[in-house]
Amino acid sequence: MPKSTTEELTRSSDKRPRSSSRSTNAPLHFTFHKPGCHVESCCGVCNLFPGVLLIAFCQVLVGSVLLTLILTHGKQYDEMHLTPTSQFMSLATGAVLSGVTGAGLLLIVVALTENCRAMLVYLLVASLVWLAIMSLAVCKISRACVRFQDAPKIKDEQHRLANLACVSGLCTFIGAILYFFSFVVVFSFYHFRYVRRAILMHEAECE
């Protein structure tokens, strides 16, 4: 009899730290997903895989089309932004569009292979591309605002080019907002997707 009581005490003492360690190491995702429920049915973020593929293809399509336009109409683009000698604006815009296209291709690879390292590389590249788009938009808008200070002195053709430059800056800023939204969607999807695997492994250990 005393042996059985001591064995029960040792078993209960062994079980307590394990349960406490499991509770402390439980994923943060348990605040949204209760253990035992089907993750696919209770979280809409986990079902965004078609949306991620759509975002990737849109990035490749838009980036390649705009890059082609910049390459074919680079001189007119530099004249519109008053950088015909340095070609700064066309080169900067082409570099940003190349980054958008490359990030879209990388997202397609990540979505099809589900490689965690490639996903981290995409998040890093996408954040740098977003910062580049925002910087380019601020540069375009600031240059357009400076040109509109001398609006009474500007001729009709130059005024039209100034309007186009301002519209280009605003479109770039809207593109930065859309790119940030797509980045948040992709980040949320892969965050919950990999945490979902941690939840399933945690439930398997509990069983």
Image: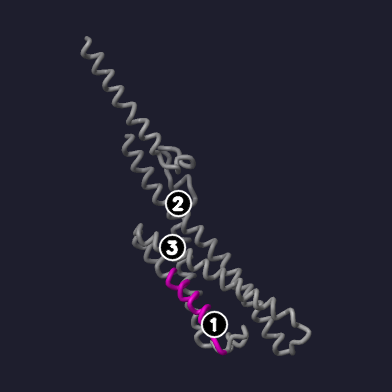
Asked if the residues shown at circle 1 and circle 3 are in contact, with their CB atoms under 8 angstroms apart, the answer is no
**Circle 2 crowding by C-alpha within 10 Å: few under 14, some 14–19, many from 20:** some
Check disc 3 and report its element: helix, strand or loop: helix
Name the residue carrying label 3.
Answer: 124
Callout 1 amino acid? Phe
- The quadrant the C terminus occupies is top left
Callout 3 amino acid? Leu
**Gap between marks 2 and 3, in whole Å?**
21 Å
Name the residue carrying label 1.
Answer: 88
On screen, 131 above or below 90? above
Name the residue carrying label 2.
Answer: 46
On screen, 167 above or below 111? below
**Gap between marks 2 and 1, in whole Å?**
42 Å
- First to last magenta residue range: 85-103
Name the residue located 70 percent from the left edge and 85 percent from the top edge.
Answer: 160
Residue 97 among those drawn in magenta? yes
Between discs 1 and 3, the one toward the N terminus? 1
- Residue 149 shows up from this direction: yes
Name the residue located 44 percent from the left edge and 58 percent from the top edge.
Answer: 49
Q: Position of residue 205 (x, y in %)?
A: 31, 37
Q: Position of 91 compared to 147: left or right?
A: left
